[in-house]
Amino acid sequence: MEIVELKERKTLAVRFRTPAKELPTRMGPIYAEIAGYMAKMGIPFAGAPFAMYYNMDMNDLDVEIGFPVAKAAPEEGRVKAGTLPGGKLATAKHVGSYGTIEATYNKLMAFVGQQGLKTEAFMYEEYLNSPEDTPPDKLETNIYFPLKS
């Protein structure tokens, strides 16, 4: 757990709503849709895939998933240009299955509270490897909570 300062990063992403239980089956095709568009347009990846969560309603998650890009890129259909926030963020790395990630979230939130800091109403995860080719106990996810100034 630590506090880092990051620069804002440009993204291409799709925002949608879904029950949390359907998230695993929805994410792969949407990442593929975005990656296909980026390939068609010759837009290179500039970082790990991410998921930004705007709420924690497990029955109706408001989530945006996509990829960082080096510079602003054109939009097409539901693939929209956006940003990952810059500034000070609390972060932790989770190693293990997505089913055990709540424990890392709880530790990170306790750390933020101990520091006397407040978070924004949204947060995001970066996926450093893929569940398609990585055993669940080896998955690596960075969790970021943007901090209020």
Image: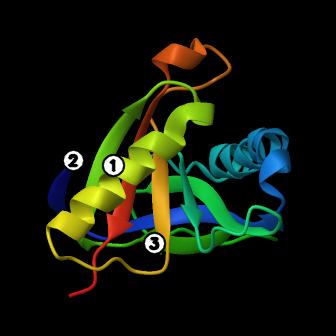
SS at badge 1: helix
Q: Which residue is identified by label 3?
A: 83
The earlier-in-sequence mark between 3 and 2 is 2
Say if 105 sits above or below 73 in the image: above
Say if 34 sits above or below 9 in the image: above
Q: Residue at x 45, y 72 (%)?
A: 83
Residue 79 location (% of width, % of height): 72, 66
Q: Which residue is identified by label 1?
A: 107
Instruction: Determine whether label 1 and label 2 are within 8 Å by CB.
Output: yes
Q: Is residue 47 visible?
A: no
Q: Is residue 127 left or right of residue 57?
A: left
Which is more toward the observer, 16 or 44? 16
Looking at the rendered structure, the kind of residue marked 2 is Met
The earlier-in-sequence mark between 1 and 3 is 3
Q: Quadrant of the C terminus?
A: bottom left
Q: Residue at x 85, y 48 (%)?
A: 22
The earlier-in-sequence mark between 1 and 2 is 2
Q: In the image, which disc is placed on residue 1?
A: 2
SS at badge 2: loop
Between tags 1 and 3, which lies in front?
1
Q: Quadrant of residue 93?
A: top left
Between tags 3 and 2, which lies in front?
2
